[in-house]
Image: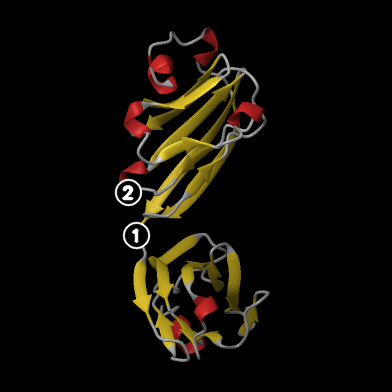
Amino acid sequence: MSPSSVLSSLILPAFWSPVVCSSYTVMEVAVNEAAVLPCGAACRTDARWIRFLPEEATVALCVGGTCGVQRDFQKRFQLLENSTQGNISLLIRSAAYNDIGSYRCSCGGRTSEVKLKVFVPTVVMVREQENITLPCYGDTRRDARDAQWVKEGRRVLLYDRVTGTVTHGRGFDDRFMLSPDGFTDGDLSLHVRLVHKLDEGLYQCTINDESREGEPRAVLLRV
């Protein structure tokens, strides 16, 4: 019998009752990409991962030193390889759209919650050395001080409407630009000149100190 089958038949200990949440994280991942849901502090006792929204289901259990993912989640989910050393973060190998929801890790009377958002990026394809525009639009009429583009967590550029300046993040140069005139009309598109292979990746656009998302919310550039 597999570890997951054994764990499915065990009676859950009393500490699985609701406790005060010790940490809360919001994560975003593109559909079919990998994501790691953290469980906070190291855990060396029995533990449980559940998805409690939109409906409750047990994802994984660690009981008596044996860890396993429940049958309904084994296709894409796994506990990290060093779960026996106290790290019980949950890996989603390839996120499906229906993985959206709120997850909770419980261990030793402590809990960590993760809200997972899964989005579908717009795909743009280009050859090296060509110019390309990554689309993004948003309402800049109300309290929109700035617009920002990030690539996989790294800032590409920040446009400040008040000063009219563009500040590039480390590793990005003036090949990446945003039109100030476009900003006035709600066009926050990112213009990239002479595309390199290393420019490939996932880009996201936000408005007003990241308080609002542009549309589309993400663009996947393929070179």
Q: Which image quadrant for residue 119?
A: bottom left
Q: Where 166 falls versus 84 (above or below)?
A: below
Question: Hey, which quadrant is residue 162 in on the image?
Answer: bottom right
Describe the colour scheme in one phrase.
Answer: secondary structure
Q: Residue at x 65, y 28 (%)?
A: 86
N-terminal-most mark, 2 or 1: 2
Residue 31 x, y percent position in the rendering: 37, 55
Residue 3 shown left or right of residue 170 in the figure = left
* Quadrant (top left, top right, bottom left, bottom right) of the N terminus: top left
Residue at the image point whose x is 36% and y is 33% from the top? 73
Element at label 1:
loop
Tag shown at residue 120: 1
Q: CA distance from mark 2 to mark 1?
A: 8 Å
Nearer-the-camera pick, 138 or 158: 158
Asked if one can make out residue 55 in the rendered structure from this viewpoint, the answer is: no
What's the residue type where badge 1 is placed? Answer: Val
Indicate the position of residue 198 as horizontal and vertical percent values. 54, 77
Do the numbered discs 2 and 1 sit on residues whose CB atoms are within 8 Å? yes
Above or below, 87 against 196 in this view is above
Callout 2 crowding tier (Cα within 10 Å): few <14, some 14–19, many ≥20: some
The residue pinned by badge 2 equals 97
Q: Give the residue displayed 38% in from the left and 41% down from the top.
A: 76
Badge 1, how many Cα within 10 Å: few under 14, some, many 20+?
Answer: some
| Circle 2: element type | helix
Which x, y percent locates residue 147?
53, 73
Against 2, residue 87 (above or below) is below
- The residue at the point 57 percent across, 79 percent down is 161
